Amino acid sequence: MPVTVTMRRTSDGETWTRAFGPRRFRSHLRRVAGDPPGMVRERFGAMAFSIPLSLENGRLAFPVTGGRVAGIPLPRFLLPVSETHESVDKDGACRFDVSIRLPMIGLVAHYRGWLKPAPN
């Protein structure tokens, strides 16, 4: 299925809108003062997650290490497990593989593919 991703800078980060056909999925990424280098926060509505970006085997990894729902901290055993990686190939395309699992539920999302910037 064709997917488009739009990244829009805001005053405190970026809003990412992913369009899977007619369905849209939006999140907001930002850095928080005082966080360690590489840490980003991603918010999906009332849910927010801490993601310490790291380099693994030449790919950027997005593990989830903390989360909140409506401002209430989630215990570690309820955190989603993110097996998400991004890399850039020799042609400049961003390759991604996103897999999200929830404890006691299992796989809730898995998509992979590549993106190239739209022509100006």
Image: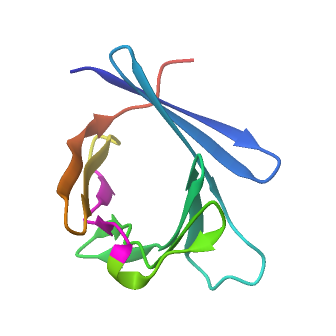
Is residue 89 visible in the rendered image? The answer is no
Q: Quadrant of the C terminus?
A: top right
20 vs 57, left or right, is right
89 vs 43, left or right, is left
| Label tally | 0
The location of residue 31, given as percent across then percent down, is 68, 66
The location of residue 86, given as percent across then percent down, is 32, 56
Q: Quadrant of the N terminus?
A: top left
Which residue lies most toward the top here? 22
9 vs 88, left or right, is right
- In the rendered view, would you say 96 is above or below 25? below
Where, by quadrant of the figure, is residue 103 drawn? bottom left
The location of residue 42, given as percent across then percent down, is 56, 58
Residues in magenta?
Answer: 78-89
Q: Residue at x 40, y 83 (%)?
A: 76
11 vs 61, left or right, is right
